[in-house]
Image (tube, rainbow, N blue to C red):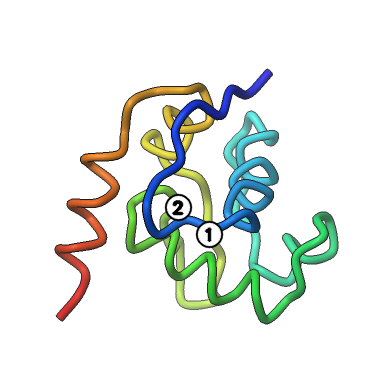
Amino acid sequence: MWLMIDDIEGLVAADVAILFFYGEHRLRISAPPATVAQNTPVSSSHANRRCKQLAKGGLLELEDERGYYRITQLGLRYLNGGDVEEEVLANFEASDP
């Protein structure tokens, strides 16, 4: 069971659905945003934008040039209620030009 304890600035409701999708797969599958859209209420274009943002925060990682993402240890810690806000915000700041 995933615990959502803290809201993190910069994350939106769709991000939770996306992280749940990747986090539910214990084998740490990689999948493109289109697969996320097929399995969540998030549209394909929105999933694509949000996966990019989640990768900037370090919650997902882009696995290859095909656009496949997977959840990171940081993303799993977030889903399990870990205090990751400072790390995620630092990642967002570092990724902005």
User: In the image, is 55 to the left or to the right of 14?
Assistant: left
Residue at image mark 2? 60
Label 2 sits on a secondary structure element that is strand
Q: Image quadrant of residue 10?
A: bottom left
Residue at image mark 1? 69
Point 45% across, 61% down: residue: 63
Query: Residue 53: percent from the left, percent from the top?
Result: 43, 67
Crowd band around label 2 with a 10 angstrom C-alpha radius: few (<14), some (14–19), many (20+): many
Q: Nearer the viewer, residue 6 or 1?
A: 6
* Rendered image: mark on residue 2: none
Query: Residue 96: percent from the left, percent from the top?
Result: 20, 74
Callout in the foreground (1, 2) = 2
**Circles 1 and 2: CB distance less than 8 Å?**
yes
- Check the picture and name the quadrant holding the C terminus: bottom left
- Check the picture and name the quadrant holding the N terminus: top right
Point 46% across, 70% down: residue: 52
In the rendered image, the residue lying farthest to the top is: 1
Indicate whether 10 appears above or below 79. Answer: below
User: In the image, is 53 to the left or to the right of 68?
Assistant: left
> Identity of the amino acid at label 1?
Tyr
User: In the image, is 22 to the left or to the right of 50?
Assistant: right
State how many labels appear. Answer: 2
Indicate whether 19 appears above or below 91. Answer: above
Point 59% across, 46% down: residue: 19
> Identity of the amino acid at label 2?
Leu
Q: Nearer the viewer, residue 88 or 25?
A: 88
Q: Earlier in the sequence, mark 1 or mark 2?
A: 2
